[in-house]
Each structure stands twice: as C-alpha cells, then as structure tokens.
Image (cartoon, helix red, strand yellow):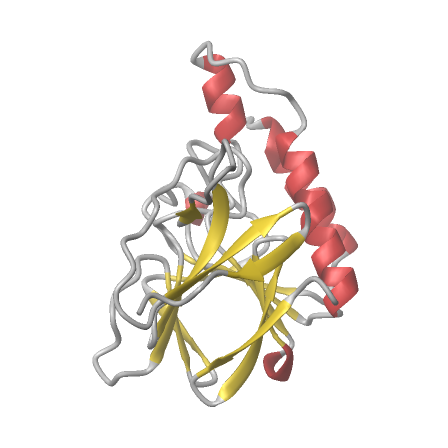
Amino acid sequence: MDDDVRVQLGDEEAVLLGERALWLPQRGAVLIADLHLGKADIFRRAGIALPVGGTHSDLQRLQQLVERTDCSQLWILGDVLHGPVHRAPWHAQWLGWREQQPRLQVHVVRGNHDRALSKATLAVDVHERQAMLGPFVLQHEPEPAEDGAHVIAGHLHPQAALPGLPRRLPAFWLRGHMTVLPAFSAFTAGVVPRLQTGEQMAACGDGAVFLLPKRV
C-alpha cells in the first residue's frame, strides 16, 4: 500500500486508497460512496454514448479492494443505485458478485438516488439515514454531527483541479470533523470545493492518492 495515504480521523488511523475508498484497519471496514449502479445504462437509453461494462469494471474494483484489504465489512455511503432495478442488466452481475463473497458484510446508508433500494434484493443491510461504526457517523449527505463526532459521507463527489492537468481528479475532502469521500463510480461529475482554513484534499489518479497542501 505504498501509494496510499494514512491519516488520523479523530483518535483512529484511516487509510485513503487510490481506488477512491477509505480503509479503517481497526474496524476491518472499507468505505465507498456513490456507486451509482445502472447509471451508464440509463445514459445509453437516453442516447448518451457511454462504453458498456461499467458495472463489471466497478465490481472488479470492489473485488480488488476486498482482496487487498482482507476486509470483513464494505460500507456504501449512499447512492448505490441510479434508477430502477427491474430487469436492469447490472442486477445479475451484482448478485453474482455477492455470491462470491458470502462472508463479506455489505452495508448501505440510503442516499437520495436509492428510492428503489428496498425492492432491489441486493443482499445488503440497509440503514435509513445514518449508521455508527465505532466513533464514526456514516452518512450520505455531509451534515455535521450534533455531538461533534467525526462524520464520513459522500454525495458531493469532490474533485481537485490541479494546475497543468486538463481534467479534474476525484478527491477526498478532509474537513476536521468530517471526511467526504470521492465518488466510486467513474461516470460522475463533481464539484471542486472551496476549502476553509485547515482543510485539505487528497486527489486520486492512476490507482494512487496524494495529499494536497492544506488551506492556510
């Protein structure tokens, strides 16, 4: 994991992974956000040309994360879906992957695109608005915790705009008592956050992640 970045979130060490995921070694948990299964299918039906195989590629990336971290839990912080499930081509691929991981606990914190999640039969545990994982509050939308606990969320799809690069890179947004994860899906737009003093980003590219300077 030489291309990963270790950070301190509250009193616990976390690892930022270049695959756009957060690894909590003490919890045996990998966290991702905004998987958006089926998004490419919807775009293609709308006449927007996107390559096929997006779900297969995402599941390969998930499998690689599970194997290299040896995690026992996978948490998806919202927007596991993007649209209806009925007869969706990705559904059988997802269930096939779940069958290969019978001991992996998969949890989903419901996001704004997850209206069909209750009927999706994805073999996951669903949490309605938030969940606790040790000292962390897991949410889809990044809202501060009332008790000051560290929040880990998604939803915003943060990206970093670096000088000299023609495209933005998906990025972690480190905000003191909150960490916002990059979108795991490759077919997502995003926002370039306006950092406040002390905040920092970590950009993902070519399977690696690198810390950018803090805002002073």
Residue located at (24% from left, 85% from top): 147
Instruction: Specify whether 61 is left or right of 191.
Output: right
Q: Where's residue 125, x and y in %?
A: 51, 62
From the image, which quarter does the C terminus lie in? bottom left
Is residue 97 visible from the viewing direction of this image? yes
**Nearer to me, 67 or 88:** 67
Where residue 204 sits: x, y (%)? 57, 51
* Quadrant occupied by the N terminus: bottom right
Classify 143 as above or below 190: below
Q: Residue furthest left?
A: 146
Give the left or right position of residue 56, taking residue 177 as reference: right
Q: Residue drawn 40% across and 56% down?
A: 154
- Residue 128, above or below 163: below
Drawn side of residue 30 relative to residue 180, left or right: right
Q: Nearer the viewer, residue 96 or 8?
A: 8
Identified at 65% across, 77% down, the residue is 28
